Image (cartoon, grey):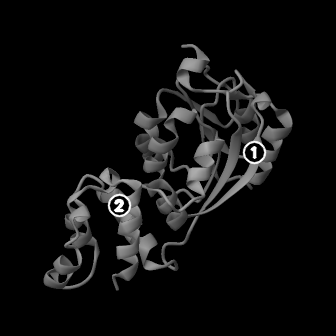
Amino acid sequence: MNLDQSGQHYMIDKKLIKYIVDEAMILPDDVVLEIGCGHGELTKELAKKCKVVAVDIEDYSVSCKNVVFVKGNILDLFAGLYEKYGFNKIVANIPYNISEPLMKLLFKVNVELVLFTVGKNFSEILTTKNNRIGILVNELYDVEILKVISPKSFRPMPRVDSALVYLEQRDIDIVDKPAVIYKELVMLEDKKLRNALLKILVGTKKDLKKKLENPLFEKKLYQLSNKEFIKLDEILREIK
């Protein structure tokens, strides 16, 4: 597969790779998932610190100590790899065309730290609370753009700037109610919002049904437009 067709741009900047590994604050007992490992430039540096589960759609088969290489599409493999290896961090230079679907999978698991390069435009979506992905990620994680990255740091070079984004999982036990509700809603994404919220929220069904009369609750979570998601967020914040 041509790299441009795969949507993958492999990182070649050694200073940037060192910076990423340092920012990941890796401990010996961590298990790191790396998505889009390519020839293993980042993989080998991560593997000096801990066990790495390295995934790529191409058969690069990175072979070195502490590395488990898996060939395939991460969108198909993600849940199974999490169950099998229990990775607690993700450090990755992801194919930009899987950014949003990967985030939807990420919301369903408990990963304490995510450090990945994405397209600069998508990094702005993640840091803005005016869209559904931005609202979700900011409820569930502390989000920071660490660095804007030039196309020259990759081969082949992408047509746009990239950004290194840092996500640290928030403690659901101490955050405000919307975050707790969202964490459960993403697990019930196949249900209509009304039915999902009746399972999640505490209270008499009669009282809750009245609060959930808005037609948007007939939709499933990811069927909402950004405007509808903002309205959902407002309603959830009003529910005691």
Tell me residue 182's x, y (percent).
Answer: 40, 66
Tell me residue 90's x, y (percent).
Answer: 60, 47
**Image height of 157 relative to 234, above or below:** above
Q: Is residue 49 visible?
A: yes
Quadrant of the rendered structure where residue 226 is? bottom left
Tell me residue 82's x, y (percent).
Answer: 47, 47
Residue at x 58% of width, y 45% of height: 122
Task: Identify residue type, mark 2.
Answer: Glu
Dot 1 corresponds to which residue?
Answer: 148
Q: Is residue 88 visible?
A: no
Tell me residue 79's x, y (percent).
Answer: 41, 44
> How dense is the environment of label 1, judged by Cα within 10 Å: few (below 14), some, or many (20 and up)?
some
Q: Decide if residue 133 is on the left or right side of residue 153.
A: left
Q: Which residue is most to the top? A: 1
Dot 2 corresponds to which residue?
Answer: 228
Task: Identify residue type, mark 1.
Answer: Val
Residue at x 48% of width, y 77% of height: 173
Element class at badge 1: strand
